[in-house]
Image: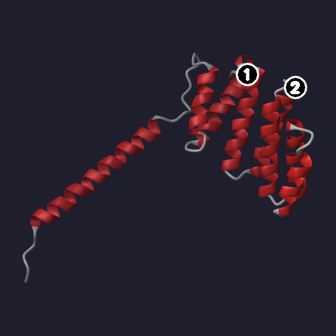
């Protein structure tokens, strides 16, 4: 019968404890650095930058934060920031595969951007709505929104976009 190597067993035990401690530290760090905590004195732009960087890693916290901006601090939102709030909500719901809700927020953003003559945001949002419809296999709606986004960019591009997009259907 072979001898038991207690040094090896001790090393394995120590490594397991070490990994467990590292796991706990990472977990506690994630819990205590959520984006839900908002300082009411914190500038809206700073909050939106935090959401931008964490929208796919902490979507639920970001949604709560965006909703608090939308409802509790709405008087502080410029028209551009209001459009950004809606846009990020659309992005997060798209990421969560809640496509109908995503479309709803993209359309709110589109309305806000259109009222403020923000043609760049209009193009981006029209394209995103088109991609959401494409993900839902609603190809006619997808083509409609992608076509309209191309019209905003240039009157000459739409037919090229339609030809490329329909060749992939």
Q: Which mark is residue 74?
A: 1
Q: For residue 2, which quarter of the picture?
A: bottom left
- What is the x, y in percent for residue 99? 76, 51
Quadrant (top left/top right/bottom left/bottom right) for the N terminus? bottom left
Q: At numbered mark 1, what does the secondary structure look like: helix, strand or loop?
A: helix
- What is the x, y in percent for residue 147? 89, 47
Query: Does residue 145 sit above or below 152 in this rendering?
Result: below
Residue in the picture at 74% in, 17% down: 75
Residue in the picture at 46% in, 40% down: 31
- What is the x, y in percent for residue 34? 51, 36
Query: Does residue 6 sit above or below 75 in this rendering?
Result: below
Left or right of residue 28, residue 97 in this image = right
Left or right of residue 128, residue 40 in this image = left
At label 1, counting other C-alpha atoms closer than 10 Å, the crowd grade (few under 14, some 14-19, many 20 or more) is some
Query: In front: 161, or 88?
Result: 161
The mark tally for this picture is: 2
Q: At numbered mark 2, what does the secondary structure look like: helix, strand or loop?
A: helix
* Residue at mark 2 to residue at mark 1: CA–CA distance: 17 Å
The answer to whether marks 2 and 1 mark residues whose Cβ atoms lie closer than 8 Å is: no
Q: Which residue is mark 2?
A: 115
Left or right of residue 18, residue 141 in this image = right
- What is the x, y in percent for residue 149? 85, 41
Residue in the picture at 81% in, 62% down: 168
Q: Which mark is residue 95?
A: none
Query: In front: 105, or 32?
Result: 105
Query: Does residue 164 sit above or below 78 in this rendering?
Result: below
């Amino acid at each position: 019968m072979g001898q038991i190597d207690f040094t090896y067993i001790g090393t394995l035990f120590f490594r397991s404890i070490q990994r467990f401690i590292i796991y706990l530290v990472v977990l506690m760090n994630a819990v205590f650095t959520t984006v839900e905590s908002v300082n009411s004195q914190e500038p809206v732009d700073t909050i939106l930058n935090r959401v931008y960087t964490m929208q796919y890693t902490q979507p639920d916290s970001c949604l709560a934060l965006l909703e608090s901006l939308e409802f509790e601090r709405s008087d502080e939102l410029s028209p551009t920031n209001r459009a950004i709030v809606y846009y990020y909500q659309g992005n997060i719901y798209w990421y969560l595969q809640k496509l109908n809700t995503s479309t709803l927020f993209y359309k709110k953003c589109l309305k806000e951007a259109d009222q403020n003559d923000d043609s760049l945001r209009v193009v981006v949002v029209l394209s995103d709505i088109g991609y959401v419809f494409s993900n839902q296999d609603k190809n006619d709606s997808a083509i409609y929104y992608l076509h309209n986004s191309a019209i905003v960019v240039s009157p000459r591009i739409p037919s090229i976009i339609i030809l490329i997009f329909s060749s992939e259907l």
